[in-house]
Image (spheres, grey):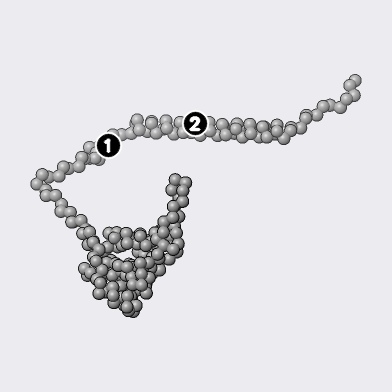
Amino acid sequence: MNSEPPSRKRPLTAEEAELWTYAMREANALRRRGREEKREAERLADEAKAERFAPEPSPATKVQPAAKPSADKRPERRPPPPKSPPPLAPFDDRDRRKLSRDRDLIDARLDLHGMRQREAHGALRAFLFACVTRGHRHVLVITGKGVRADVERVRDHFIEERGVLRRLVPQWLADADLRGIVVSYTAAGVRHGGDGALYIRLRKQGAGG
C-alpha cells in the first residue's frame, strides 16, 4: 500500500488570485450587460407593438394648421431702439481750476493704485454708479503714473507696460454704459495727483448734464 498522505491543492499565488478576481468581475459584468440588453430589446418590442396597434386620432383631435395672417392686418409697431448716450464733452476749464484749488468741491474719490485691470474696472463702475445715485457731481479717480509696471509675456519676451490704468480709465469712461452717467473728465491738478488722477463730472439723475 502507498503510505504517502493524500495530496492537497496548492494555494493560489497573489498573481493567480488577482487574475481569478478579475475574471470573475468580467464574467459578472457580461451577465449584467446581457440582462440589460435583453430588457432593452423587450422594451423596444413592446413600444413598437403599442404604436402598431394604437388607434388613429379622430378628426376632432387632429392638429389644425395655423391660420395664415390676413393680408389686411397691419404689422405691429415696434418701439424705437434706445438712444445712444451722448459723447463725452470737454471739461470746463473754470470748473477744473476751482476743483484744483478747493478740495471740498470734490464729492468723492477713488484710488485705483495697485489694482489689476479687471479689479480696477469693476471698482470704477461701482464707484461711479454709486456716486450718481448719491447725487455727486464731481469726483476724483486716482490712476497712478505707472510707477508699478504690469508685465505681459509676448512671444517669450517680457514687455513692460507702465501706466496701464492711466491709459485704460479714459477708455472705460468712453464706453456706452458709463457715458450715460459721465459728462466729461480731465487731468487733475498737481495737488490732487496731476497726470496720475482725473476729475470726473457726473450727470444729474433725470437730467441731460
On-image quarter of the N terminus: top right
Q: Position of residue 25 (x, y in %)?
A: 61, 34
- CA–CA distance in space, label 1 to label 2: 32 Å
Which residue position holds label 1? 57
Describe residue 158's horizontal placement relative to residue 188 as left or right: right
Which residue position holds label 2? 38
Is 184 or 84 nearer to us in this picture?
184
Q: Position of residue 147 (x, y in %)?
A: 44, 63
Residue 143 in which image quadrant:
bottom left
Given the image, on which type of amino acid does mark 1 rest? Pro
Residue 136 in the image: above or below residue 25? below
Question: Furthest-top residue in view?
Answer: 1
Question: Furthest-left residue in view?
Answer: 72
- What secondary structure is found at the residue carrying circle 2? helix
Q: Residues within 10 Å of mark 2 (few under 14, many from 20)?
A: few
Describe residue 92's horizontal placement relative to residue 194 as left or right: left
Q: Are marks 1 and 2 in contact (CB under 8 Å)?
A: no
Given the image, on which type of amino acid does mark 2 rest? Lys
